[in-house]
Image (cartoon, helix red, strand yellow):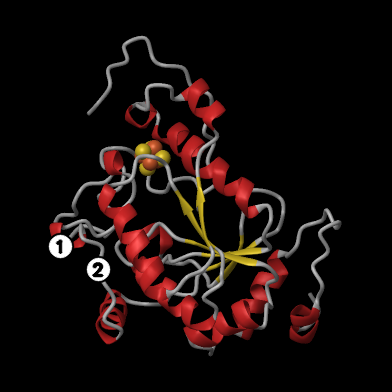
Amino acid sequence: MASAAKLSSRPLDRIDTGPRFSEADAIRLNRMFRASDTNELLTAVLKDRIAGDVALVSSFGAESAVLLHLAAQVDPHVPVLFLDTDKHFPETIAYRDELVARLGLTNMQVLTPDPVDIAAKDDNGLRWSWDPDGCCDLRKVRPLAKALAHFDASLTGRKAFQSSGRATLPRFEIDASDAQGRLKINPLIDWSAADIDAYFEAHDLPRHPLVEQGYLSIGCAPCTRPVKPGEDPRAGRWSGWEKTECGIHVPGEAGDKDLPPDYEPVF
Ligand code: SF4
């Protein structure tokens, strides 16, 4: 990418099999938007289309309402991708529907796992208990990869304060999950927990109902516990495992593991 003007006018050719963006593009975008606020960034992405076709990936978790609200102000037709793993808390599904209606989002897309994959590799639905990487691969990584193949960039709601693994993330990066060169855009990466709280307050946004029970980061029900005082907000995710991300944000190597001989499901 040679310049901002070239970036904003560049037609993204679907026949072009090369990567859409390069590391140099991500660096240049981070410099271009160094002094911009979140709304300016979202306007450039969603209205001026500087990153081509963009989808917002949302878990409809504890803080998701902020990015969804910000994006809806710029473009309520933005595609919003939700991974329905079939393992969510019922409260999450209800909250999702409430937020979509409240914010006037018109392009909600629910992604589900391939039933053939599930039948072959998680027929009893308990893979999470002995191979969470493999379970996330089937229920999150693969469906999202399939959906994102149609987009040039994705928006995430990640914040630096959520965990040490997210502390140094930039606003723009290359999605390393494949070789397509999609941009991954983190508009809220520099927001503090206080900023998030203030935004909820200022816009009277509803909270996920599990937040008041101590769930500060909310994923699938079997893999999420409330967070104790002093812990990272994401400490309740895959507690007891080395795992800290589902594979969407960190390239994973979810293999085709077989059940171990001494396998006992952990409930
Ligand atoms: S978070 Fe847990 S239940 Fe959900 S897809 Fe990953 S391992 Fe499976």
Q: Secondary structure at mark 2?
A: loop
Q: Residue at x 49, y 66 (%)?
A: 169
Q: Is residue 195 above or below residue 24?
A: below
Q: Which residue is mark 2?
A: 207
Q: Residue at x 44, y 66 (%)?
A: 157
Q: Quadrant of the N terminus?
A: bottom right
CB atoms of marks 2 and 1 within 8 Å: yes
Q: Which residue is mark 1?
A: 212
Q: Give whichever of 165, 215 is nearer the camera.
A: 215
Quadrant of the picture in which ligand 1 is shown: top left
Q: Position of residue 59 (x, y in %)?
A: 40, 57
Counting other residues with Cα less than 10 Å from the Cα at mark 2, is it few (<14), some (14-19), or many (20 or more)? Answer: some
Q: How many marks?
A: 2
Q: Secondary structure at mark 1?
A: helix
Going from N to C along the chain, the mark reached first, 2 or 1, is 2
Q: Quadrant of the C terminus?
A: top left
Q: In this image, 133 relative to 228: left or right?
A: right
Q: In this image, 31 relative to 52: left or right?
A: left
Quick check: can you spot residue 206? yes
> Mark 2 to mark 1: distance in Å?
9 Å
Quick check: can you spot residue 61? no
**Residue type (three-letter) at the residue carrying disc 2:** Arg
Q: Residue at x 52, y 30 (%)?
A: 115
Q: Position of residue 122 (x, y in %)?
A: 44, 25
Q: Position of residue 33 (x, y in %)?
A: 58, 84
Q: Residue at x 15, y 62 (%)?
A: 212
Corner quadrant of residue 181 = bottom right
Q: Is residue 209 above or below residue 40?
A: above
**Residue type (three-letter) at the residue carrying disc 1:** Glu
